[in-house]
Image (spheres, rainbow, N blue to C red):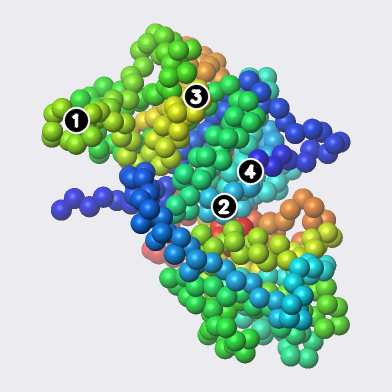
Amino acid sequence: MFVPCDRGGGSAAPDFKGFTLLMPAVSVGNVGQLAIDLVISTLDMTKVGYFYTDCLVPMVGNNPYATAEENSTELSINAEVYSLPSKKLVVLQIRSPFIKNKYRPFCETLLSWVKSSKCARVVLLSSSHAYQRDDEQLLGTPLRYLLTPDLEKAVGGHMKELNWKEMERVAAYPGISDTEKVLHIPGGGITKLLFTESCSEGIQMAVLLKFCSEGDNIPDAFVLVNYLNEWLQLIKSEVSTSNNSTDPSSQWKIPSSWRLLFGNGLPPALF
Amino acid sequence: EVVVAPSRAGLDEEEEAREETPEDREIRREIEKKREIDVVWTWRPGGCAEEPLVCSRFIVAIGRNAAAFLSSFILDSVCWEVVGVVKLWNEWCRTSSTTNVLPTDSFCLFYRLITDPTVLLCQCSCYVAEDQQFQWLEKVFGSMQKKGLQVTILSTCPVADYKTQESTLTLVSPFLKALKTKEFQEQVCCPLLEQPNIVRDLPAA
């Protein structure tokens, strides 16, 4: 599945042992994917390979993180892997929707790659339909987290210190009071499947998600990536001197491919 | 009535809903079989199957416009011969099984240059669905010897899909853009496609 980039000089395939794999779920508002774009763009990560998979709609374009003429012509496809060894971080970006009936095959192949490359843990950025929140979820923070039992032991305490809210389980049959509680992540794409599979395979996985709706999801992406940063400390959140708050939003670099996200401007001939 | 807006992320809510029953699996397999792609090489004498096609240049025209371009300017019965056909079915089209096609038919044919049989051309005017694109790719390229192969893909997109700051009325005509791999060292005849524009589906595959 994973095809390393040919960096020339006969370099060996990259080693992800002990790394954290950060990846998005293709979910409502594409928030996870937008947040990953911010991470790759801000940390100026190097592409180390791609996934050769029949599970995603094919797409190709030129470098979405181009900053100048010189680096704008590297081709980019639907599932690519970037790495930052100094932070032991490897990032997977997914750029197109899943093909029907391919959720499960993708999850299985991905998790077996996670195991074979000996990644220490997986962090999945995702989102869920805001309109499906219950009364309690409508109040307070729209951010939630989930940890597989293996990761719970390692970092569960830290989440409590950060005052993070765990994703609530809902009744399997709403309205009937004594049914079992299950995990329900509407609009989350592969999130629930990947999480439940990781639980049963003993993989350390964390899910960070935000409740949101379709629309301009750039602000949601910033909120989610800042949430991630509270834990992983990927960038320093500088204290702003003007209002003495720690708001790292301005330190994330928006990639050049986010231009014209909602189409072209109005043609003057219209008026 | 509250209408749920479809998600841009292309989410398939049914997928996460339930486990596959044996009946579901059976139905899914039947549909997959129906949607299977069949690549038939007509130049191979019957029986002889597995040696790969030696190919130095492969030109693929995807979509009716690109296919028509080849028909109008390149193909003729003197220099080119039909060597293969792709048979497929999906909700949008079924390819004709004959090689004597009309421009309005849905077809996917392979031609070979008679004076240089390593030059191959493909006219694919039928729509290849998302779940068939990878299969098309593997089956077509799987039959070829790919060393030293140069592939040129011709395709069209609506101008309305082109993202630009300037007005699309002032775009130069014909409006051509290209994408190339870093291995392609020759001169490209037009500017490269700049972000945020992308290509999807079979040309991308």
Question: In the displayed structure, would residue A7 be above or below residue A168?
Answer: below
Q: Which residue is mark 1?
A: A179
SS under mark 1: loop
* Disc 4 residue type (three-letter): Met
The mark that comes first in sequence, 4 or 1, is: 4
**Would residue A236 appear left or right of B61 to someone viewing this image?**
left
Q: Is disc 3 placed on a helix, strand or loop? A: loop
Going 54% across and 63% down the picture, which residue do you hit? B132
User: What residue sits right under mark 2 in the picture?
Assistant: A54
Q: Quadrant of residue A180?
A: top left
- Whether residue A34 is visible, yes or no, is no
Residue B31 seen in render: yes
Say the numbered circle drawn on residue A1.
4
Badge 4 and badge 1 both on one subunit: yes
Q: Nearer the viewer, residue B174 or B96?
A: B96
Image quarter where the C terminus of chain A lies is bottom left
Where is B194 relative to A269, above or below? above
* Crowd class of label 3 (few under 14; some 14 to 19; many from 20; radius 10 Å): few
Q: Chain of mark 3?
A: A
Q: Earlier in the sequence, mark 2 or mark 3?
A: 2
Upstream in sequence: badge 1 or badge 2: 2
Label 4 and label 3: CA atoms lie apart by: 21 Å
Q: Which residue is mark 3?
A: A202
* Quarter occupied by the N terminus of chain A: top right
The three-letter amino acid code for the residue at tag 2 is: Asp
